[in-house]
Image: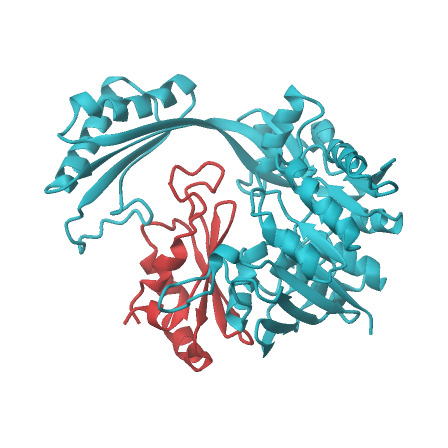
Chain colours: A cyan, B red
């Protein structure tokens, strides 16, 4: 039976590069997929495209392609990635130039476009925002991006046209992996059992090292070997959609039933109904079996018909957040930290800083779980943190300033003050009919 | 004892919704954990963090539970004022429950 080996080259935009090169060189792969586009990233990329129309793709694209592309071509591995972000065509052009620089004549690079629906937002003003239930026209804040989570359609088309590299904008993360599987095995898009099985493969692989022992270690309880040399995962999948998960021999980390279980449930809600553009996947009956050291077989996923909608993610200018921190240490430091928080709170009121929401906390005490736990020993160090949401940037600046002025105006011994102001781009979602969106492939060939 | 002794967990986020898995080390403990760690118990444990409902899903073959917690992340990763905007550390908070 035909088998396809598919590796995961990145679990997020800024991930390590070497594990992916190791996979390309030693993984006997057919494909390597780089998932590099978080929920909000595309909105930020859209802004960089506005200031320079040739930009708007992942900032590490050149760095990754410079190393991965020659190795991939040499080892006959195809690359699939969403590093195109807000500008897949420009990312394909840059990749073509890198191919030419390395003398890789004839390499075909495809850009998948069609996810950007910003120009068509006018006709969607009555649609309900998924997060709030209000209509889109009531959204408070300037919309700067609108991208549909596409499925495998464009990726499959690009591969049919002979692409060696496929660069997308917004697609569902599992589609980066399901796309090549569906293409290689000739799966019918309506074969929802296969779509569900391939979606599971994608879901397990899309976060890179998170299934090979990364984000898993608990010293003394769940010890993981050499995380500093963590190997990224690869799957060997058969035509029936099932197969095994492993990593390159000799790399750090581990692939066990338990690492797979943690990733299976990561970022899913109802395991029977995992919504993707290609199917409603059912992971509720998934089983894992350890076949050998770092080899786990996966089975039991299935799927149901897709919905007639694409989820469209909207980035909008929401607010500003101002933050400040300062540390206290030694005897009675907690009391000095509490006094510091009280001073900042009163100062922000005196300054009439308009805060829509605020947080006063002590790192190491209540900054993660916001509870008033009392069963801790007196700490040797306490770092306060104040954060405030504002409509005006000038107000956000004052939050950090009022923490910083504790240096000369606050309790004894405060040190290491820091402050920060961020413009917040938030995300809202609407469901847009699939028939409204045309997915296209633009092919470029290195000369 | 703490749930940490017999189970492990990972948190995921989508918008303002947090999902926290609960996976037993020894599959024989699954039924016991399923009986004790109910939606109501988790809702109570997270009451000062999670403003909305808590829904529990079972994965009987994987011997694991998934707790989906609504209105849990101060508006979600894009606009939360928290330091841990994803709520990644909530898995550790679940494991701090007594069993």
Answer whether residue A239 is visible to the viewer in this image: yes
At which x and y percent is residue A172? 67, 49
| Residue B93: image location, x then y, percent | 34, 58
| Residue beneath the point at 40% across and 70% down | B7
Residue at 48% from the left image edge and 41% from the top image edge: B77
Residue projecting furthest to the left = A331
For the residue pair A200 and A315, the one nearer the viewer reads as A200
x 84%, y 43%: residue:
A107
Residue A126 is at least partly visible in this image: no
Residue, x 70% and y 30% (percent of image)?
A: A118
Q: Position of residue A430 (x, y in %)?
A: 64, 40
Q: Nearer the viewer, residue A193 or A292?
A: A292
Nearer to us in this view, A289 or A213: A213
Q: Is residue A396 left or right of residue A268?
A: left
In this rendered view, identify the residue nearer to me: B35 or B93.
Answer: B93
Q: Where on the picture, by quarter, is residue A203? A: bottom right
- Above or below, A29 against A385 in this view is below
């Amino acid at each position: 039976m035909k088998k396809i080996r598919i590796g995961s080259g990145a679990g997020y935009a800024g991930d390590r590069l070497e594990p992916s090169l190791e996979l390309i060189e030693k993984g006997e792969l057919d494909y390597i997929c780089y998932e590099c586009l978080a929920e909000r990233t595309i909105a930020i990329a859209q802004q960089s495209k506005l200031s320079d129309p040739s930009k708007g793709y992942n900032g590490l694209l050149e760095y990754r392609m410079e190393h991965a592309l020659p190795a991939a071509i040499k080892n006959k591995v195809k690359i699939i990635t969403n590093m195109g972000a807000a500008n897949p065509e420009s990312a394909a052009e840059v990749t073509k130039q890198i191919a030419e620089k390395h003398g890789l004549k004839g390499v075909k690079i495809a850009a998948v476009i069609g996810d950007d629906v910003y120009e068509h937002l006018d006709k969607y003003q009555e649609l309900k925002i998924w997060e709030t239930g209000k209509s889109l026209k009531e959204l408070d804040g300037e919309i700067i991006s609108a991208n549909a989570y596409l499925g495998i359609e464009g990726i499959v088309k690009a591969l049919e046209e002979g692409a060696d590299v496929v660069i997308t904008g917004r697609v569902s993360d599992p589609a980066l992996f399901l796309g090549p599987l569906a293409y290689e095995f000739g799966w019918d898009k309506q074969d929802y059992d296969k779509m569900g099985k391939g979606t599971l493969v994608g879901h397990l692989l899309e976060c890179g090292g998170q299934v090979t022992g990364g984000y898993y270690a608990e010293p003394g309880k769940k010890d993981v070997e050499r995380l500093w040399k963590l190997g990224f995962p690869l799957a060997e999948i058969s035509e029936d959609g099932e197969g095994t998960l492993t990593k390159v021999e000799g790399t750090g980390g581990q692939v066990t039933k338990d690492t797979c279980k943690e990733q299976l449930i990561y970022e899913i809600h109802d395991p029977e109904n995992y919504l993707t553009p290609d199917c409603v996947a059912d992971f509720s009956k998934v089983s894992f079996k350890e076949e050998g050291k770092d080899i786990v077989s996966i089975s039991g996923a299935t799927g149901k018909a897709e919905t007639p909608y694409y989820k469209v993610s909207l980035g909008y200018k929401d607010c500003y957040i101002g933050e400040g921190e300062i540390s206290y240490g030694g005897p009675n430091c907690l009391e000095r930290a509490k006094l510091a928080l009280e001073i900042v709170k009163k100062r922000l009121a005196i300054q009439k800083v308009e805060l829509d929401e605020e947080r006063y906390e002590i790192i190491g005490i209540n900054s993660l779980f916001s509870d008033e736990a009392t069963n801790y020993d007196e700490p040797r160090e306490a770092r306060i943190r104040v954060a405030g949401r504002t409509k005006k940037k000038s107000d956000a600046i004052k939050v950090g300033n009022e923490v910083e002025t504790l240096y000369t105006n606050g309790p004894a011994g405060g040190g290491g003050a820091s402050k920060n102001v961020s413009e917040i781009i938030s995300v809202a979602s609407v469901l847009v009919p699939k028939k409204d969106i045309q997915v296209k492939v633009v092919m470029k060939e290195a000369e | 004892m703490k749930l940490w002794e017999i189970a492990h967990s990972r948190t995921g986020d989508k918008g303002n919704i947090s999902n926290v898995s609960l996976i037993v080390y020894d599959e024989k403990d699954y039924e016991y954990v399923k009986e004790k760690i109910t939606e109501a118990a988790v809702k109570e444990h997270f009451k000062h963090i999670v403003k909305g409902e808590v829904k529990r899903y079972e994965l009987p073959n994987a011997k694991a539970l998934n707790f989906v917690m609504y209105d849990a992340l101060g508006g979600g990763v894009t606009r939360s004022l928290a330091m841990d905007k994803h709520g990644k550390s909530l898995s550790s908070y679940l494991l701090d429950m007594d069993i």
